[in-house]
Amino acid sequence: MYPSLVPLIFFSIAAAFTPGPNNIIGSYSGFNFGIKKSIPLILGVTFGYTTLITLSAGGLNVIFSAYPILKTIIKILGSLFLIYLAYKIATASKPDTNQQNKAKPITFIQAAAFQWVNPKAWTMALTAISVYSPSQQIESIAIVALVFGIVNLPSVSLWAVLGQQLSKILSSHSRLRVFNFTMAGLLLMSLYPVINP
């Protein structure tokens, strides 16, 4: 048995279920589009994050050690993208068939690609690899990626379901605005650990 499996599972649960960009976007999607239309986002986050962990172990962490400026660049680009995303969430309106420019659910590709500019995803991926797969052996990398993949799926799903349930309570336009502004604010707050580590 993999000796660090239990601590790895606890770490992945803490990383995946706590509020962060992926979960906030999952709640926003569930609230605005429902769970069925949020499935591509849920699968995209899971696939993208698992791929990020695997590639981090495959040498990206060595590149970051050699060129620490790359971490700073990713933090800046990721933070700018999250600010843009927060703006889009805050100004989004409920999808309506009568609207010409209605909001659309996040796609699988968009959710997977988002992991590459998600500062929390990078931090957790690099931490997981350095702590739980220091030897960089294929088996340990596969276990770390698999555990995070398995844990991420129910995490983002749960947050999307939470968003969908809230949409039943917050059905008026003004309540929708409050929810979207709250999600945008939480997304901005998730930048605090990145800006002030």
Image (cartoon, rainbow, N blue to C red):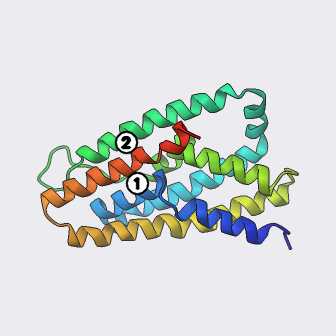
Q: How many marks?
A: 2
Residue 124 in view in this figure: yes
Please identify the residue farthest to the front as the structure is shown: 196
Location of the N terminus (image quadrant): bottom right
Residue drawn at x 54%, y 44% is: 193
Residue 145, quarter of picture: bottom right
Residue 84 pos. (x, y %): 37, 36
Residue bearing the label numbered 1 = 25
Residue 125 pos. (x, y %): 67, 50
Amino acid type of the residue tagged 1 in the rendering: Ile
Residue bearing the label numbered 2 = 85
The residue carrying pointer 2 sits among few (fewer than 14), some (14 to 19) or many (20 or more) residues within 10 Å by Cα, namely some
Sooner in the amino-acid sequence: mark 1 or mark 2: 1
Amino acid type of the residue tagged 2 in the rendering: Leu
Residue 128 pos. (x, y %): 72, 54
Nearer to the camera, 59 or 165: 165
Q: From the viewer's perspective, tell me whether residue 96 is left or right of residue 5.
A: left
Residue 165, quarter of picture: bottom left
Q: Secondary structure at mark 1?
A: helix
Residue 94 in view in this figure: no
Location of the C terminus (image quadrant): top right
Residue drawn at x 84%, y 60% is: 139
The residue carrying pointer 1 sits among few (fewer than 14), some (14 to 19) or many (20 or more) residues within 10 Å by Cα, namely many
Q: From the viewer's perspective, tell me whether residue 79 is left or right of residue 83.
A: right
Looking at the image, do the residues carrying marks 1 and 2 touch, with CB atoms under 8 Å apart?
yes
